[in-house]
């Protein structure tokens, strides 16, 4: 198992075909580190792509993110209840990727959220994702097992293609 920062793939985009992209909530969340710790003793060749980079340059890294999502084995969308995150964007992005037919895993531990309208909305969103064929997991252990299974699956390599993105609102 290896975790690599997104910008280490610059100029090596074909390596995304053997990776799992760890998208979703950033901010102060620690789920990526917990996942890496959970996978460290597995004998596998999982490459985890961490999109969080210290010197994020939108013009470069947003394009690299799209290439990664289009070419990796799966995209994990972590939805966590942390302060200063873009969780709403994560839901929009997950919907967009599901509509594109991507192999998506949503990691969302509902027990992190207080009962109320936000939690109800999250549950409804997760139900929608299930209807679109998205795998939902609620624990890091479950996420690790799912990633190991996906990594074992053989799939033909895909060429890095044209980047498509959700329409912008103007």
Image: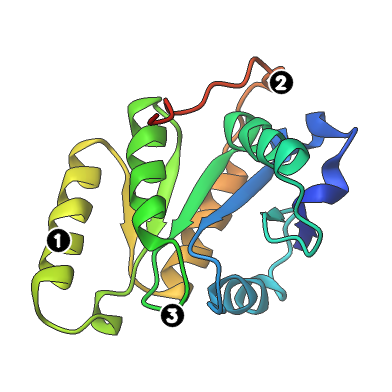
Secondary structure found at label 3: loop
Residue 140, how many percent across, how many down? 47, 74
Please tell me which residue lies in front, 96 or 31. 96
Circle 2 packing at 10 Å, graded few (<14), some (14-19), many (20+), is some
Please tell me which residue lies in front, 165 or 68. 165
* N-terminal-most mark, 3 or 2: 3
Residue 161, how many percent across, how many down? 66, 16
Circle 3 packing at 10 Å, graded few (<14), some (14-19), many (20+), is few
Q: Name the residue under label 1.
A: 121
Secondary structure found at label 1: helix
Instruction: State the image quarter where residue 132 is shown.
Output: top left
Residue 121, how many percent across, how many down? 14, 61
Q: Which residue is drawn at 12% across and 55% down?
A: 124
In this view, the residue farthest toward the right is 11
Q: In which quarter of the image is the C terminus?
A: top left
Secondary structure found at label 2: loop
Q: Which of the labelled discs sits on residue 160, or is there none?
A: 2
Query: Height in image: 37 above or below 55?
Result: below
* N-terminal-most mark, 3 or 1: 3
Nearest to viewer (mark 3 / mark 1): 3
Q: Which residue is drawn at 59% across and 29% down?
A: 70
Instruction: State the image quarter where residue 139 is shown.
Output: bottom left
Query: Height in image: 138 above or below 127?
Result: below
Report, in whole angstroms, how far the alpha carbon at label 3 lies from the one at label 1: 18 Å
Report, in whole angstroms, how far the alpha carbon at label 1 lies from the one at label 2: 35 Å
Q: Name the residue under label 3.
A: 83
* N-terminal-most mark, 1 or 2: 1
Circle 1 packing at 10 Å, graded few (<14), some (14-19), many (20+), is few
Report, in whole angstroms, how far the alpha carbon at label 3 lies from the one at label 2: 35 Å
Please tell me which residue lies in front, 146 or 21. 21
């Amino acid at each position: 198992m290896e975790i690599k920062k997104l910008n280490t793939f610059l100029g090596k985009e074909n390596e995304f075909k053997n990776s799992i992209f760890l998208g979703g909530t950033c901010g102060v969340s620690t789920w990526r580190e917990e996942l890496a710790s959970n996978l460290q003793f597995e004998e596998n060749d999982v490459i985890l792509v961490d999109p969080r980079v210290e010197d994020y340059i939108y013009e470069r890294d947003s394009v690299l993110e799209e290439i990664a999502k289009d070419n990796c084995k799966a995209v994990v969308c972590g939805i966590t209840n942390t302060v200063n995150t873009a969780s709403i964007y994560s839901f929009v992005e997950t919907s967009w990727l599901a509509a594109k037919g991507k192999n998506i895993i949503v990691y969302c531990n509902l027990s992190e959220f207080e009962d109320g309208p936000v939690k109800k909305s999250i549950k409804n969103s997760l139900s929608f994702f299930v209807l679109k064929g998205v795998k939902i997991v609620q624990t890091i252990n479950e996420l690790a097992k799912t990633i190991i299974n996906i990594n074992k699956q053989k799939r033909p390599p895909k060429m890095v293609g044209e980047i498509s993105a959700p329409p912008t609102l103007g």
